[in-house]
Image (cartoon, rainbow, N blue to C red):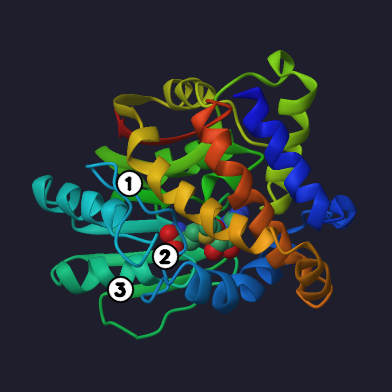
Amino acid sequence: MEELLQKDLETLKGVYDFSFLFSYTLHPKEIVSYYKKNKYLFYRLMAKSKSGTMHMGLSDDGLCLKNTCYGNYQVDFIDRYIKENRCHTILEIGSGQGANLLSLASRNKECFFYGIDLYPSIDKRLENVSLLKGDYHDLSEIADHTIDLVYGIETLCYSVEKEKVFQEVQRILKKDGFFVLFDGYANKKRDTLNALEKEVTLFTERGWMLSCFEYVHHLDYYARSHDFSILRKENMKKKLQAHVDSYKNRLDRVFQHKWFCKLAFSFLPKEILGNFASVYFLSNGIRSDLFCYYLHVFQRK
Ligand SMILES: C[S@@+](CC[C@H](N)C(=O)[O-])C[C@H]1O[C@@H](n2cnc3c(N)ncnc32)[C@H](O)[C@@H]1O
């Protein structure tokens, strides 16, 4: 596994100068600009996300979805949860382009959906969707104990104050309400990483504008200390691997043309190059258990 990560690092260093990744301050304004720039070129074109979802593809059979890496697994899961538990009022934190909200709101017309994002946008207005512009660490626009289910897909990874998010979610959820998360984490504690793993982790975090991948088991602590019980905690590695491998294979085909890359990459925004780098490292990062992707379902006591 070490050799795979080493090879990935050498390949990327052959086509990239990584120094640009360290020019970020990781201010929320930079995160907004990052998603604006990646919206079309990365998500719509490379990832072929027609609906505008900006999350990983997952599949039960472990096979890559045809023609797209951006599937509906996460949204279908949340839809089932809403129906099985008769949830009426739902909030998505980090709702991005609103694709998950649109899909769920049109499938659950009797429910009301809120979405909050630093840069919320949506292709279509629906009567049962309300978008809030803001930071999900502060949910003060939502009253105490009014929400049945809160979910977040690949957004909590941006938080450096997850305790605060759990505290806010705890406040707005009704008793027995649910908090569902699909997200990426570090699978090993930082102080146990060797030099190569540290370098790959740092480049992957920076490429996605993350301050730091959280060690996955820290979430148990946040949940318990805010009065949540853990209903489900599942490593999604087998469901994800084929999708991230498919990205890597496509990028490998491009990266072998070193001179073309050097020229083309001098025109591309650094936010897109950063995303390429992180996605590239993810494949062997997941395979070697350096990174992981988990589904968590918490229930407010
Ligand atoms: C990978 S995208 C996922 C978007 C959406 N959940 C989806 O599945 O399509 C991450 C989103 O989190 C948002 N985000 C990051 N930090 C945030 C914060 N502190 N408050 C609100 N939104 C945030 C970003 O603006 C971005 O839209």
Q: Residue 26, percent across and down?
A: 77, 54
CA gap between label 3 and label 1 equals 24 Å
Label 1 packing within 10 angstroms: few (<14), some (14-19), many (20+)? some
In this picture, residue 211 sits left or right of residue 86: right
**x, y percent for residue 188:** 60, 20
Residue tagged 3: 102
Which numbered disc covers residue 205? none
Q: Which residue is mark 1?
A: 145
- Queried on whether the Cβ of the residue with tag 3 lies below 8 angstroms from ligand 1, the answer reads no
Q: Amino acid at mark 2?
A: Gly
**Picture residue at 71% right of the left edge, 19% below the top:** 193
Outermost top residue: 192
Please tell me whether mark 2 sits on a helix, a strand or a loop.
strand
Provide residue 129's location: percent of width, then percent of height. Answer: 32, 74
Image position of 254 (left or right of 226): right
First reached walking from the N terminus: tag 2 or tag 3: 3
Q: Nearer the viewer, mark 3 or mark 1?
A: 3
Mark 1 / mark 2, whichever is N-terminal? 2
Vertical comparison of 59 with 185: above or below? below
Q: Quadrant of ligand 1?
A: bottom right
Q: CA distance from mark 2 to mark 3?
A: 10 Å
Q: Badge 2 is on which residue?
A: 115
- Number of other residues with Cα within 10 Å of mark 2, as a class: few under 14, some 14 to 19, many 20 or more: many
Q: Are marks 2 and 3 in contact (CB under 8 Å)?
A: no
Residue at 25% over, 51% down: 78
The residue shown at (40%, 84%) is 123
Of circles 1 and 2, the one toward us is: 2
Looking at this view, name the residue that lies furthest to the bottom. 124
Q: Quadrant of the C terminus?
A: top left
Label 1 with label 2: CB-CB less than 8 Å: no
When asked about the image quadrant of residue 108, the answer is bottom left
| Amino acid type, label 1 | His
